[in-house]
């Protein structure tokens, strides 16, 4: 069954070949800590010289032990993927990771971020894009301008 996210990724793959592999879910574990990194949303725009996608990533992590740090937590970030319109390699830019849910101290939870599971991108000028975390109502957090032309592989 194809999801709405899968359809978005397929559409973006036609503009930025090779992006599908970069957006695959990743799982890892280290001792008793398990991580699942996955894309929650992805959006596409074009600048003067680039096809540009932004993905909203989430890292769901939990510990499977009896010590004080056990529980479920979540972090998130945005990642920009750009490719020159006439070809070339994909260049990437990752924003700072934002803590959302604490796996060991619920008093530290950022409940104001829980609904911000989407990515937003807009072409601002030349090769500059604006990116942000978005919610279903179109509200944005962590707005950032990225000069795609200045990024290097």
Image (cartoon, rainbow, N blue to C red):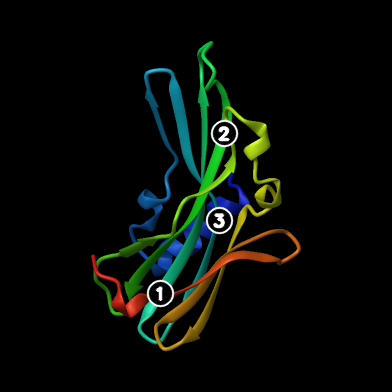
* Residues at circles 2 and 3 in contact by the CB criterion of under 8 Å: no
* Residue 91 against residue 51 in the figure, above or below: above
* Residues at circles 1 and 3 in contact by the CB criterion of under 8 Å: no
Q: How many neighbours does mark 1 have within 10 angstroms: few (below 14), some (14-19), or many (20 or more)?
A: many
Which mark sits nearer the N-terminus, 2 or 3? 3
* Residue receiving disc 1: 51
* Residue receiving disc 2: 73
Tag nearer the camera, 2 or 1: 2
* Residue 83 against residue 4 in the figure, above or below: below
Q: How many neighbours does mark 2 have within 10 angstroms: few (below 14), some (14-19), or many (20 or more)?
A: many
Q: Nearer the viewer, residue 91 or 74?
A: 74
SS for callout 1: strand
Occupied quadrant, residue 90: bottom left
Q: Name which residue lies at 34% across and 62% down.
A: 92
List x then y, in percent, for residue 129: 47, 77
* Residues at circles 2 and 1 in contact by the CB criterion of under 8 Å: no
Q: Name which residue lies at 35% across and 84% down.
A: 49
List x then y, in percent, for residue 9: 49, 57
Label disc, if present, on residue 7 of the rendered structure: 3
Q: Is residue 28 left or right of residue 67?
A: left
* Residue 144 against residue 133 in the figure, above or below: below
Tag nearer the camera, 2 or 3: 2
């Amino acid at each position: 069954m194809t999801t709405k996210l899968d359809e978005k990724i397929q559409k973006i793959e036609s503009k930025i070949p090779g992006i599908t592999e970069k957006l695959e879910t990743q799982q890892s574990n280290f001792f008793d800590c398990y991580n699942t990194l996955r894309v929650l949303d992805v959006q596409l725009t074009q600048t003067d010289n680039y096809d540009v996608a932004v993905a909203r990533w989430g890292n769901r992590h939990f510990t499977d032990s009896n010590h004080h740090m056990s529980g479920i937590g979540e972090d998130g970030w945005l990642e920009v993927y750009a490719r020159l319109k006439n070809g070339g390699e994909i260049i990437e830019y990752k924003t700072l990771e934002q803590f959302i849910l604490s796996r060991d101290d619920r008093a530290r939870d950022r409940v104001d971020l829980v609904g911000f599971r989407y990515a937003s991108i807009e072409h601002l000028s030349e090769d500059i894009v604006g990116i942000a975390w978005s919610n279903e109502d179109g509200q944005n957090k962590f707005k950032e301008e990225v000069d795609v032309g200045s990024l290097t592989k």
